[in-house]
Image: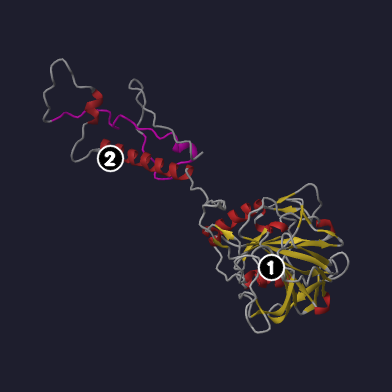
Amino acid sequence: MDSDIRPAKRPRAAEPRAPEIPSAEQPSDDESADIVIDENSWDNKEKPNPDPKPVRPGKPASKWKERMKLHWPPGKKEWITLLVILLLIGGGIGGYLLTHKSKPATLKPIPKVTSQTKTVPSTLTGLLVDPSVNQRTVTAVMIENSIDARPQAGLGQAGVVFEAIAEAGITRFMALYQDTAPDNVGPIRSARPYYLQWELGFDAAYAHVGGSPDALSDISAWGVHDLNQFYNGSFYHRVNSRGAPHNVYTSIAQLNQLEVNKGYTTSHYTGFPRKKKAFRKKTQPITAKSIDLAISGPTYNVHYDYDDKTDSYLRSEAGAPHIDTNTNQQIRPVVVIAMIVPQSTGALDSSGAYYTDYNVIGSGQVDIFQDGQVITGTWTKNDSASQITFTDASGKAIPLNPGQTWITALGSSNEVTYTP
C-alpha cells in the first residue's frame, strides 16, 4: 500500500553486500517501502587521506565517521548517498499526499434562532432567520402523491410547495427548502419541464429520480443545478416499508452536502414580497373559511379549512387530513395560492398514460387566500429564469404572510371555489 512507507534498513557491518543502484523507474508499492542505504562504497576500499588530521589520544576515529566524511569534489559514494536521501524525502512527501487526502467540504448546520440572535426575514418564507440562512442554497425536491406514496415525509416543513398534475390526473409536489432541513423527505419521483421552470425562479438545486424525456433534456439545456438520484445514489436511500418506485427518500442535510460537492453553494433569487407578520383584524370578516380545488378527481382534489386561532389553512386531500409522517400533524400552510395555468395533454409515457403539460410562461388569474380572505389578481412569469409575481387589480404586488406558501396550478377558474 502507498501508505506503508517504512524506514530504511541498514545492513550489518559484518555482512556487507553489493551496492544497490537506485532505479530511475517508479518503485512498486512493496519496493518503495524497502529502499536501502548501502553504507559501503562499491570498491570497498578506503582511499588514503592526503592530509590526515591528528586523532585525539585514546579516541581512535571510527570507521563510520571516516566513511561519512565529505569530499570535494564529491565522489561516487557521496552522489549515491545524496540520491538515495532525495528519493526517501520524495517518497515521504508522496506518501503523505496519498494518505492525507483533503476532506470534502462540509456544510454548517442551520443556526438556531434565539431571542438574542440578530434576525432578518427569510428570502424564501419571510420568517425571521439567522442572516446566514439566506446565503444557503434553495433545495427543490420532487415528491410523489400517488396513493402508494401517501403519507409523505417533509412536506409540512417546506417553505414553498408547488402542486400540479404529472400524468393521468396524478398530482405531484415540488417542495422548496432553505429555512429548514428535515431528516426525512420523500418519496421522491421524476422531473417535469414546468417544475423546472418554477424552480429556476428560485435558482434552486433540483432533486429528483429521473424524469420525462423533455425534462431531462431541459435540465441540460437550461443549466439546472441537477441532483438526479440516477447519478448520485449514495445521497439517497430506499426504505423497506414501501415497494419501488415509491420508496426513494433522502434528507436535506444529504442534499446540502451534495450541493457543496457540486459547487452549488448559494441561490440568487428574488423572493415573494412578504408582510412583516401575519395580521387580521378581529373586526374583519372571514370571507374564505372553506376552500376547494378540483384538480383532477376525488383522489387528488384538495380541501382547506381556515383556522382562525393559528391563521393557517388545514389541508385535506381525498376527503382526509393530509398528514406529514415526520410530525404526524396535518399540513397547514399560512398562504394558499390557486393559479390558473393553461394546461394540455403531452406525449405518452412508457405506461401508456399521457404526460400533462402546463404553459407556465406568461400570465393568468390567481386567487390568493390568507387571513381568511381572498384576493383575486394576476400571476406573471416572463421567462424560465424569472420569478413569479402576484399583483392585484391595480398592478401592485400582493404581499404574502410569512410562513409556508402552497401554490396549486389549475386548468380553469371553475376549479376554484370557496365559502365564508
Residue range (magenta): 20-49
- Tell me where residue 283 appears, x and y as whole percent: 72, 70
Asked whether, in this view, residue 301 is left or right of residue 106, the answer is: right
**Residue assigned mark 1:** 280
Residue at screen point 72% across, 53% down: 249
Work out which residue is located at the far top of the displayed protein and give it: 58
Q: Specify whether residue 23 is painted magenta.
A: yes
Relative to the observer, which residue lies in front, 3 or 103? 103
- Quarter of the figure with the C terminus: bottom right
Residue 400 seen in the current view: yes
Please state which amino acid type lies under the numbered disc 2. Answer: Trp
**Closer mark to the observer between disc 1 and disc 2:** 1
Please state which amino acid type lies under the numbered disc 1. Answer: Arg
In three-dimensional space, the C-alpha distance between marks 1 and 2, rounded to whole angstroms, equals 89 Å
**Residue assigned mark 2:** 79
Work out which residue is located at the far bottom of the displayed protein and give it: 394
Location of residue 82 by image quarter: top left
